[in-house]
Structure formats: structure tokens, C-alpha cells
Image (cartoon, grey):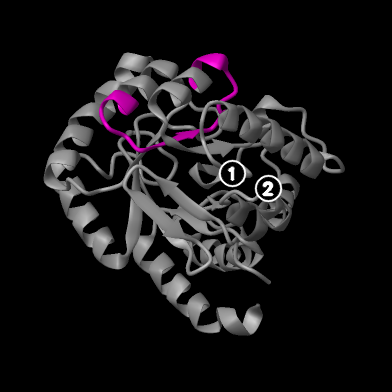
Amino acid sequence: MTLNKQRFSGSNFDFNLSKSPIIYAILNLTPDSFFDGGVNAGIDNVFQRIEQEMGYGAAIFELGGKSSKPHFDDISADEEWGRVEPYLKAIQKRFPNIILGLDSNTNEVIERGLKSGIQIINDIDGFNSDAKLQLVQQYHPSVVTMFNGRNFDEQPDTLLKTMTDFFEKAIGNLQSAGLSKSEIIVDPGVGFSNHNTLEFDIIKMKAIKELTKLNTPVMTAISRKSFAKRLFGFELEDRLIPTLLFEAYMISLGGGILRVHDVKETRELIETFNIFKDELM
């Protein structure tokens, strides 16, 4: 076992992922997100959460103004940005050194976020348009490019190749737009299949090892997702333990960036993993 030896870098940050995985905290500002919809209502509540999760070791906070759960209801760019903008400005004022990501696949929202100082863009569609690539070239953010199985005819026997072909093309396009590999995270997209089957999710989790060969940072983004329900019948409130166990497995394969809801517990997982990582390598 080896940790991904890549760095993840960008505007005012540089993380050595071979030293330790990092925590990428989810901060949904939507009323309908699958796990924490409506939880972060109110600036003071968000401030308190950020302060607490910084103390637990969160390195990055990602704002999201639109749910991307299966069969989500799309909204306008204005409504999506209207959910994000007041929090973004307040957070930047209160925490001037914070590293912020934006979870959006909407061109107008991505551009507004970049103009407002967002450092990382997470696109569930993997920057699959010229318009998005032009924004990357113009503003030079770091990015998370995800494999969205809803955009593909996924087949179990060919899924790994479909994913790697997609990522090779996406990375090439992003490099042509001016990014280095240390500025590009790949995310296999667990939970983003048309049929939302356990089989596809397991393939994507196991794919971490192969994806490290792309020589980019690899994201583990499985927090509280429905694979735990399909495996064990667990509802949302009971999915923490399987999430942590599968995250530990994915870290061991090279997933160096953990996108999570449960920051405190993830910190404890990483500290435990780091005690034994030299024995595992």
C-alpha cells in the first residue's frame, strides 16, 4: 500500500498528500441536500461550524448551493448563486485565510464564484464543456473533476476503462487550459450512477488504486452515501461507521483527499491511519 505521492496545490495552499490525507469539509447551503439540507441556515451557525471544524483539522471548506443527489430538482443560476453569495462574503470576511471550494456545474455560478475569490471548483460533470475550460484558463482555479456516471452508459465489465479514459481526456483538457496535475483532483463519483447500484459503487471505490496512476490527487467522496443502505439497510443517521471503514480502505489505496460531512470522526480516522501507515507501506 502507498499513499498517493501527489501534492494538491492552488492559490495560497500546498498540501503534501504523501504525508497525510486531508479533510475537505462539505458545507451545503441548500434546503434539500440528501444528508444536511437546511442544517446550515444562518451565518452565525455557519461561523460556529467552521470554527469547530477548523479545530478538528478541516483543511478546505466547500460551499454548495444546489443538491446533486439522484433525481435532484435543478434550479436557476440566480437561485443557486443567491444561496451561496451572502455566506461566501461573510465567511471570507470572518476567515480571510480560509481555503474555499464551490460545488457547482453551472457556468454562470462557477464564474461568479471565481470572480469572488473561490480557489477550488468541484464540477460533477468533469469540466466537459469549452465554456468551463475557458473559465479555468481565465481564472486558474484548482479543480475537482468528477466522473458522473449519469452522463454515461455504464457497464460493469468496462466501467474502469470508461472512467480512466474519461479522466485522461479531462486531465489533458485541463492541462491545456493551464493547470498542472497538482491542481487537478479526480473523483470516481461514487453514488453518481444512472441505476445507482451497489455494484457500480464498489467498482468505483476499488478504482482508487488504478486512478493514482494518473499522477493527480484522488478524492474519496463517499460520506453517508446510499451504498451503506444497499449493503446493510442503514438509513442516513446510521451510515457513519460504514463510511469511515470504506474511507479507510480508500485511503489505503491512495485516496488522499476526504470529502466529508463528519469532520471530527474523520480526523480521528486519519490520526489512527497515520499511526499504522508505515507498517502498511
Residue 252 visible in this rendered orientation of the protein: yes
Q: Which of these two is toward me, 189 or 60? A: 60
Residue 206 percent coordinates (x, y): 71, 56
| Residue designated by label 1 | 186
Point 60% across, 66% down: residue? 3
| Quadrant location of the N terminus in the rendered image | bottom right
Inspect the image, locate mark 2, and give the three-letter code of the amino acid beneath it.
Answer: Leu
Q: Is residue 52 shown left or right of residue 269?
A: left
Point 21% across, 39% down: residue? 41
Q: Which of these two is toward me, 265 or 279? A: 279
Residue 207 percent coordinates (x, y): 72, 52
Inspect the image, locate mark 1, and give the three-letter code of the amino acid beneath it.
Answer: Val
Numbered label attached to residue 214: 2
Q: Is residue 214 shown left or right of residue 159?
A: left
Q: Is residue 112 shown left or right of residue 189?
A: left
Point 33% across, 33% down: residue? 30
Point 63% across, 36% down: residue? 147
Q: Nearer the viewer, mark 1 or mark 2?
A: 2
Residue stretch in magenta: 113-132
Q: Is residue 171 shown left or right of residue 49?
A: right
| Quadrant location of the C terminus in the rendered image | bottom right
Q: How many marks?
A: 2
Rendered view: 203 above or below 175: below
Disc 1, SS: strand
Numbered label attached to residue 33: none
Disc 2, SS: helix
Classed neighbour count for the residue bearing mark 2: other residues with Cα under 10 Å, few (<14), some (14–19), many (≥20): some
Residue 42 visible in this rendered orientation of the protein: no
Q: Are marks 1 and 2 in contact (CB under 8 Å)?
A: yes
Rendered view: 187 above or below 267: above
Name the quadrant containing residue 186: top right
